Amino acid sequence: MCKQRLLIAVAYKDGMNGRTLARCIELVGKMIGNEHNRELFDMDVAIHRNVPGKAPSHAGRFWYHAVAREELIFDYLKDEHDYILWVDADIVSAPPDLPALLYDANPDGVTAPLVLIEGTPQFYDTLGFIEDGARTRPFPPYFDGPVTDGLVDLDSVGCIYLAPADVVRQESYGSRPYDPKYDHPSIAQTGHTDHWPVMCAAADEGYRIACLTTAVAYHADLSEEGWH
């Protein structure tokens, strides 16, 4: 079988909690060494540190996140990459074979695991995971839609997800974040995160966007480890 080429991408802002970042990097190392992943993918890793400059006057809440991700894409995402696994830098635990699990479940789409706050059943990214225009519930049941083969269809996912590289390469961050078309306004303006342009691009191109409910990733408990 011909392997797919995967970029595992972690973008972080200068000054984030060092312990949290170290745990995320350790998780990425486990993914690289996992046999299930290695059977499906040739893997590259990009861990990109963003030193924030001064945001433009119209920049929203997620502008710095978008800058870090865009810099990573310009520097590391190559033509030979078939898929990209976004990993927010404060994801501290997940199945080591998560890339393979997500690919096996939805090979032609955008797929995320459940993202819970470490040590709790509370869903973390209720802002990034959108179902029928509504935010995900913080406690079970998280979703309304039917679950088929572990997958529930969504409008958007976030935090950690596998996506076809073309979605990101061609559509999502094609312009600098200070371009108003690609800027990421605050919650008060749109209610969406910096992942929203990726999801819009995927939906426009007919990709299935889903959450694999049988796989769980854990976000650092920010009350314990600090916000980045």
Image (tube, rainbow, N blue to C red):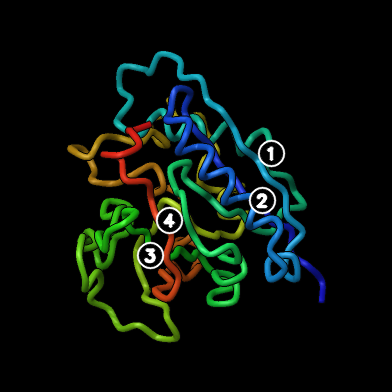
Location of the N terminus by quadrant is bottom right
- Labels 2 and 1 touching (C-beta < 8 A): yes
Q: Which badge, 3 or 2, is on the more N-terminal residue?
A: 2
Left or right of residue 2: residue 171: left
Residue type marked 2: Leu
Name the element at disc 2.
Answer: strand
- Labels 1 and 3 touching (C-beta < 8 A): no
Q: Which badge, 2 or 1, is on the more N-terminal residue?
A: 2
Cα separation, mark 1 vs mark 3, equals 27 Å
Location of the C terminus by quadrant is top left
Viewer-side label of 4, 1? 1
Q: Which mark is residue 199?
A: 4
Cα separation, mark 2 vs mark 1, equals 8 Å
Cα separation, mark 3 vs mark 4, equals 17 Å
Mark 1 neighbour density, 10 Å: few (under 14) some (14–19) many (20 or more)? some
Left or right of residue 50: residue 42: right
Residue extending farthest to the right is 2
The residue that label 3 is drawn on is: 114
Name the element at disc 3.
Answer: strand
